[in-house]
Amino acid sequence: MAVIGNKKYSKQIEHHFSKYPDKRSAVMPLLYIAQEEYGWVNDDGIQEVAELCELDPTHVKSIAGFYTMYSEKSKGKYWLQVCTDLSCALRGADEFHKDLKAYLEVEEGGTTDDDLFTVEHVMCLAACDNAPMLQCNFHYMENLDMEKMKAWVEEKRAELQKELDA
Amino acid sequence: MVTPVKEDTELVTINIDGKDYQVPKGGNLVDMAKWVAGNDIPVFCYHPKMDPVGMCRMCLIELGGVARDRATGDIQYNDDGTPQIRWFPKLQTACTQTVNDGMYIKTNTEQVKEGRESVIEFLLTSHPLDCPICDKGGECPLQNLTMAHGNGVSRMYFDDKMHLNKHYPLGDLIYLDRERCIQCARCIRFQDEIVGDDVLAFHERGRRLQIITNSDPGFDTYFSGNTTDICPVGALTTGDFRFGARPWELTEVPSISPWDAAGENISLSTRLDRDFGGKAMIKRVMPRQNEYVNEIWISDKTRFGHHFTRSDNRLSKIQIRKGSNFSESTWDSTFKAVAKTLKEANGSVAAIAGGSATNEDLYELAQLVTGLGGDKLGAWSPTHTGADLVAQVGLPEGSNLGELGAGDAILVIASDLEEEVPMWRLRLKTAQDRGAYLVVANGRNTRLEELATEDPNIKGRVVDGAAIRYEAGSAAAVMANLKKSNKDIAKKLADANHLVIVAGAEGLTLEGHRALVQSAANFLIDSGHAGKVNSGLLVPLPGANGMGLHYMGFSPETTQDIAANPPKVLIVLNAEILDDDPTAKTWLSQVDTVITLGYFMDAIARESKFVLPVQTFAERDGSFTNGERRVQRFYTAQGPMGDAIPAWKAVGNIAQAADLGRAKLSAAAVMVAIAKNVAAFEGITYKVLARTERQFPDVGGDDKYYGGNAYQNTGGIGKQIALSGTAKSEKVTVPDALKAGKGEIVLLPTTRLYDRSHMFIPTVMVRSRVSLPFVHLNPKDAKALKLADGDYAEVNYDGGSVRVRAVVSDDVSVGAAVFPRKLTEKATPLVPTVGTITKVTEPAQIEG
């Protein structure tokens, strides 16, 4: 795993650099790339972004620490952010959030033992009409209930099992 | 005097609490209120040496200005004829205000009082209040300002207190207590603005905001200790002093750094300590403000390097050789025996002294040698020369590197200043920040090169701008031909208002360095800078008293003469000749008797007939002359080590025993004799050296907020020796650079700040930061030698061989291998020499 030298990102990185007069200005979009690659902003990612932006790694870490959308804790493969704000709650999102945690046997912000799922609650994701909803790795899953959710979770677990067996 | 008011300063009138004051325009309000009115506006984040940020909000004041009609711009008056003042509706931060005409401030109103009280209460919401076990307790700005401005009670729920890491090592030397931190960012800004190595930063935000470093290895710049001084709380502490003593138990003794030519003013905090047999012991080293020399900073070597003074390896007894063994003796009989030996030499007596001997020691030694009919006084080490030219075209009296700025220029040639004289590097870096044009010329890449002024109009060999990379060893030729080979840079230097040239000796033989220094002097004379205040020549002479050696008659050229014509009796004072120079044993074997005065049983001491223990700077008083020719006095701080006495005393008593006059009774008395007999020291007495003056910025006084940050200078700011002599621009003959034959390579010794010398190695806590011995090669040379980066190599040279690690990169030039001195216990080349390097495979035999 790497950001530097990874073909997947080279175009994106070039694009971000081209937007700014200084390389250092691209530090935030590049941090997102690092987060995408590693699942969270880890020390390897920080080193690589620092190298790319010609910054001291301390400053890259400082930026990652300031903004809450960068995660500095390792996350499961699926990062589930459930909206529990008022209008979602009126449609049962808080119950859904609670049930989901109970089903996955995790605390708030915690990760399942198999490193597949991380659950946390977030502020408004602007999809109240389709609540309960959540954001999985920044992609929306809407009109949820526990039945649907359980099926999805088991599907992902089966996928993992298949991978492990192979 | 160092003051904000210069002859040409424009003054403006400001009103503080109803009283008018004249202050220099553009000054910072906090500094000015303190300087002219003695009004201590409390601060945490603000520091006069750094840009204001207005983060802590402690300096809130009421701010107003003369009201003007918005349409006409006319001043509006009250009915009684006084001008109307328009006040800001809310409190303003004083630290972010620059003074301007008609500024009105109030610092003592109810609103201000409440503002300060609230800020204190807020800062204390998560502070652990563990003052009883805190190293800063007793000299803590937070403690002081809480007592002065705080409410005494908190409305904070204790359960909501943040719990953070309390013993977090930022590196080997500095520990962070995240609970105590009040997020003033002084440490972050110090690293960024003053040092230029921004390895500290904030992480997270709000109440979780904390200091981090991601540098690898840890936080380890050469100035890291200064962050603990400017920390206004006990968040940053040094591994050296942590839990060592309470500030109120300590006695502050003014002293001078014994390490390098900068002559940093320090304060030795001592206490009668169990660990040192109940004698006074240095617990820590703090900076002492001297705006001419070190401002309020010191290097980590100065701060942490004091351990050698109490090392178990210190010489504590007189050792006299009997056959192949040494036996102890008493001073009285030793004086007689040494005097007898000296007299029997019939004038064939010479002395070699190192840079840690004081002016007094050197004067008495010179008196002894000349009194016995000898005339050879050698300075150690014979690597750097040109002190005579510094005496003629150095920085004149009243100069201050801290005043260099826009329109001025600095050339650093053949010196890795960060490793040789870190304080000069720090001050030249800040000069560059103020706009000075910094040119760095060297035969290899140094940290300093990054700081060279960028200038896209000047095409350099490595980087565009003011970094010159020349063929290793050709510094003298580069300097002599600067006007031809680097026209643009030479013109910028010559046209600058002030010009400082630092001429090091890296890659040069003594003759080569002589040519370089003379060329540099020529440049200063030709450009009209010689003798101008804030312009002149600096040479990073080794040791704290390189210039003192010159004034007392010791020269490195004489050292070469002594080596070429060895005397019958040689007196060695604080010079580790055999540890430093692998070729010295050849000529030393022709000396009948060696008398050594030193701190350690080093290699030369083991070869001596008489070994006399002398005291270090810590245990005695004396004076050093720094590289800017400032004579500075230090005082007795630490208890004695065994039988060691000051060198001037030992030498004086030997002279007395040899019937050359009575020994002096005090260092002060020696200085009286120096003033009488050494022209440059005319008028200098210990009283003159102890003179202090008010300095700007005013830190470490009676205020409550710089306390523990920097110590006011109570020991004297020293006296700079005036320039003397009339140096002329002389034709320079540049000696040929060393040429390596087939299969050979030129070895270029360099200086490392942290090394394995007898004086530095007792500082255990820094040991992990002393580089393993290495030889640094260009990839081309490495290829020819079949060496790869990280391989082990045997370096063979005249007088020895050593196994080290090879470092391969194009930071060094082709045909020359950089081979740092004093990283191994074996002597490695002192001056450039030709040697061979071969690959070896047994890493177990690596030295160091």
Image (cartoon, coloured by chain):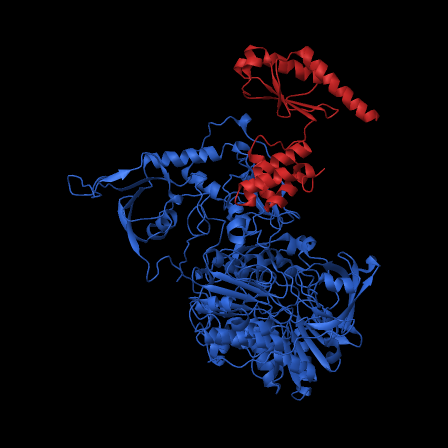
Chain colours: A red, B blue
Can you see residue B493? yes
Among all residues in the image, which is located at the extreme bottom?
B346
Which image quarter: residue A27? top right
Horizontal side of residue B155 vs A48, given as left or right: left
Q: Number of labelled discs?
A: 0
Residue B650 at x, y = what percent?
Answer: 62, 74
Of B250 and B353, nearer the camera is: B353
Instruction: Name which residue lies at 54% across and 17% down.
Output: A85
Q: Is B721 drawn above or below residue B9 in the view shown?
A: below
For the N terminus of chain B, the image quarter is bottom left
Of A36 and B10, nearer the camera is: A36
Residue B428 at x, y = what percent?
Answer: 51, 60
Instruction: Name which residue lies at 57% across and 57% down.
Output: B450
Which image quarter: residue B848? bottom right
Of B160 and B328, nearer the camera is: B160
Can you see residue B329? no
Of B441 and B608, nearer the camera is: B441
Which image quarter: residue A133? top right
Residue B721 at x, y = what percent?
Answer: 46, 72
